[in-house]
Amino acid sequence: MAARSADSLRVVRIRVLVSLAAVVGALLCVGSASAGTLPQSLARVNVPAADRSADLKTLADARALAARLGGSRAQALNAIIKSATQIGNQAAFSPALARIVFLELQTNVTYLASHAVPSSGTRIRIDGVTYESYTGQGLRIQPLGTYFAILEPGQGIASEGGVGVAMTNAQKIVLTDGDRYTLPYLFSWMGTSPNWQSAMAEGVAASAGVDVWNRTGDDTFLDTAVRFGNGALADGITVENNGLWFPLYVFAPSYRVLNGHMQTVLAMNDLADATGDDGFADAFNRSVATTKAVLPNYDTGGWGRYAIGEDAPVKYMTLMATQLKDLGQITGDTAFTDMGNKFTADLKTPPVITGPAKPPKPLKLKKFKQQKPFIKLRITRDKPVTLTVRIFTKKGKSAGVGPAVISVASGASAIKLSLPPKPGRYSIRADAKDWAGNKVKNVVLTTLILKK
């Protein structure tokens, strides 16, 4: 689409990317301002009297409800109070952040008063915000889920009044920092204390803003998108060859999650296309170059990696395939398209498993003495699989041990297998089932000779 002029859109120019050192410094500033109670924290940052009174009532209601209900609902409410107290003691605490903290607490008080805690992973839309249930944590504001619901609207968004209303309602979970918007997560994750940010969440919010602007023609939503884009850029990190990487978790910049990065790369293209802003275009080009450079590291040969050394769950394989094809279409670079098509195919092809290149040397049973005989057999997998390993006699009958069933990641490792107690020549075979349900059966891994 043709970009509008910068003047007519009043596009806020993007900030200079913060350095990794600045990110670390910002994280350190989130340290404790004082070991105070929540009421003391509200007073310290001068939350307006009327808001403070409402917040204190919410806090009292939460404590009373926890005491009355007990069990998992009390655990959830107390966990939210605990994290709220942690956030209140941080130097970054503010009236704006308090508003989001107490929104989350009030929502849990209202919901848990008449509902059980949903099973972990359940997402619920309440008053235009997506909440996710975490074990022992209650319902937590899910910024990424909130804006994905707007970017890919279903009937639920229509019932809320449409994407424009949904985008406006979501502002209640947004923090303003100069010319950028950020989205705080209010619970502990991966060992870090709340609150924390995600460049992916800000990227999705930016794409949602562009999409809503396209649907409504309201420039307010494009301004919102730009501010989210500025937030994502501020969270980006400069890598090799002046490349750009968008961390899923800003507090863990070295944890390179591919789908989170690519989603924000696509957001930079959305913003560049909508605004004509050279800064977003440059960010897109730099992050595309980084993506192409690292892409081979995210392919096991038969599966995709979520992060280096970590196989991608099926839903992220599907997402990454779509993202790669989108990048291929935007850039015209077949490297992205080919990898996207490969990931799609990987979801439908059976796993490849192999045993050692050479059969193991004959084993003497007497060396095991009183211990049950075993072997550590190196098995290679091109995908994460559940292996079922069986041992057969020379005549093809069961050797009377096992089967051994084990779930393993892609790659190669030595797997301990129990052996039959009698000498003879044996065949070790395996079935394998990958995470998408594809199967391979009766693969001969090796033969083994057992002697007395």
Image (tube, rainbow, N blue to C red):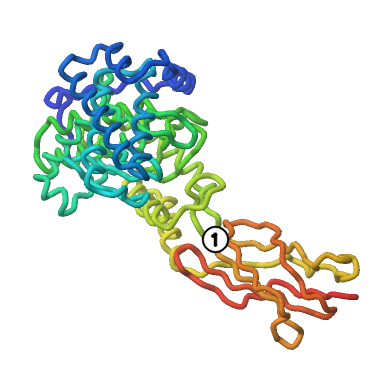
Horizontal side, residue 306 vs residue 90: left or right? right
Return the x and y of residue 446 as percentages of the image width and height.
Answer: 73, 72
**Residue occupying image coordinates x 90% and y 69%:** 366
- The residue furthest bottom is 395
Q: Eyeballing the image, is 452 above or below 130?
A: below
Secondary-structure class at tag 1: loop
Q: Can residue 133 be seen in this view?
A: yes
Closer-to-camera residue (163/262)? 163
Could you classify mark 1 by the number of other residues whose Cα lies within 10 Å: few (under 14), some (14-19), or many (20 or more)? many
The residue that disc 1 covers is: 383
Question: Considering only vertical position in the picture, is 364 above or below 47?
Answer: below
Q: What residue type is labelled 1?
A: Lys
Q: Which residue lies furthest to the front in this view?
A: 68
Near-viewer residue (3 or 362): 362
Quarter of the view holding residue 278: top left
Q: Where is residue 6 in the image (x, y as percent from the top left)?
A: 17, 25
Give the quadrant of the N terminus: top left
327 vs 295, left or right, is left
Q: Residue at x 48, y 39 (%)?
A: 256
Q: Residue 361's spot in the image, x, y percent?
A: 85, 68
Quarter of the view holding residue 300: bottom right
- Look at the image and tell me in which quarter the C terminus lies: bottom right
Q: Is residue 413 left or right of 293 when viewed as pictured?
A: right
Residue at x 46%, y 28% (from the top left corner): 238
